[in-house]
Image (cartoon, helix red, strand yellow):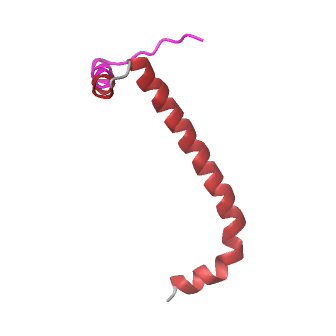
Amino acid sequence: MAMTLRLNDEESRRLAELASSEGRTKQDVVRLALAERWAQLHKDEQLGEVLERVLPKYRGLLDRLGSA
């Protein structure tokens, strides 16, 4: 699916600079940025799920360490 990305002059310059310095196309830089942000979002969600399961188990220990 095609889309139009509207950037101001500064954003366009930064994108071109990134692409040039990485030897990529501007399109590739945008795609990579999207993939990295998506991966980070899901990594954070997974961490949150793990912490919800693990923290209650170790709450007492963490409280004791925090007050030491």
Which residue corresponds to the image point at 41% horizontal and 15% vertical from the top-left? 6
Q: Residue 31 vs residue 17: left or right?
A: right
Residue lying at the far bottom in this picture: please name it: 68
Quadrant in the picture for the N terminus: top right
Residue 39: where, in percent of width, then height? 56, 40
In the rendered image, the vertical position of residue 2 relative to residue 34, given as above or below: above
Q: Nearer the viewer, residue 9 or 16?
A: 16
Q: Residue 4 vs residue 64: left or right?
A: left
Q: Nearer the viewer, residue 22 or 50?
A: 22
In the rendered image, the vertical position of residue 57 relative to residue 45, given as above or below: below
Residue 64: where, in percent of width, then height? 58, 86
Magenta part of the chain: 1-16
Magenta stretch encompasses residue 7: yes
Q: How many marks?
A: 0
Q: Residue 35 vs residue 45: left or right?
A: left
Q: Quadrant of residue 23?
A: top left
Residue 47: where, in percent of width, then height? 61, 56
Q: Quadrant of residue 15?
A: top left
Q: Residue 67 vs residue 55: left or right?
A: left
Which residue corresponds to the image point at 28% horizontal and 27% vertical from the top-left? 21
Which residue corresponds to the image point at 49% horizontal and 25% vertical from the top-left? 31
Magenta stretch encompasses residue 33: no
Q: Nearer the viewer, residue 10 or 14?
A: 14
Q: Quadrant of residue 22?
A: top left
In the rendered image, the vertical position of residue 68 relative to residue 31, given as above or below: below
